[in-house]
Image (spheres, rainbow, N blue to C red):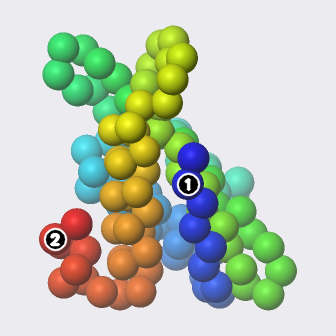
Amino acid sequence: MRRVTFIQEDCQGVFDTVRQVVEDHGFDVLYADRYHLEVEAMKVERLGRKKHMSVRVIEFKNNELEVSIEVRNMGLEIKRNKRNDLLEAKIERALTLLIRKDRKSYSAA
């Protein structure tokens, strides 16, 4: 699980950005709750393997937002998969760059 903290006034804008980044990485959104700021998504890979992503935006005081990203394999996962950790890092990087409005670097991510 990865966590990123932003200082941003518009939490709905961050939620929309999170949803866009999730879709850009090939995930199909299963559930998106604008009130609780949660996104649940799934991605089908080769040989029928499925990955499940959970992203939550948590509001704190003084316009501080924390984005929690977790990618898991569907089914029994005994050990953390390094590829899931790398995917979480890619999504974190893309989200950070997009929120900073750095479109040129985002397209290379």
Placement of 41 over or under 94, stated as above or below? above
Where residue 13 is drawn, which disc sits there? none
Residue 38 vs residue 34, the one in the foreground: 38
Residue 12 vs residue 94, the one in the foreground: 94
CB of mark 2 within 8 Å of CB of mark 1? Answer: no
How crowded is the residue under tag 1: few (<14 C-alpha within 10 Å), some, or many (20+)?
some
Q: Quadrant of residue 34?
A: bottom right
- Across and down, in percent, residue 77 comes to 50, 18
> Which residue is found at the position 22% from the left and 80% from the top?
105
> Which residue is found at the position 71% from the left and 80% from the top?
64
Say what amino acid the circle numbered 2 marks.
Answer: Ala
Q: CA distance from mark 2 to mark 1?
A: 21 Å
- Across and down, in percent, residue 57 comes to 64, 61
- Across and down, in percent, residue 10 comes to 61, 82
Q: Which quadrant does the C terminus fall into?
A: bottom left
For marks 2 and 1 on the same chain, the one whose residue lies earlier in the sequence: 1
Where residue 108 is drawn, which disc sits there? 2
Placement of 48 over or under 9, stated as above or below? above
Q: Quadrant of residue 2?
A: bottom right
Would you say residue 55 is visible in this rendering? no
Placement of 12 over or under 47, stated as above or below? below
Q: Which residue is under mark 1?
A: 2
**Exactly how many numbered labels are in the figure?**
2
61 left or right, relative to 41: right
Would you say residue 106 is visible in this rendering? yes
Say what amino acid the circle numbered 1 marks.
Answer: Arg
- Across and down, in percent, residue 63 comes to 73, 84
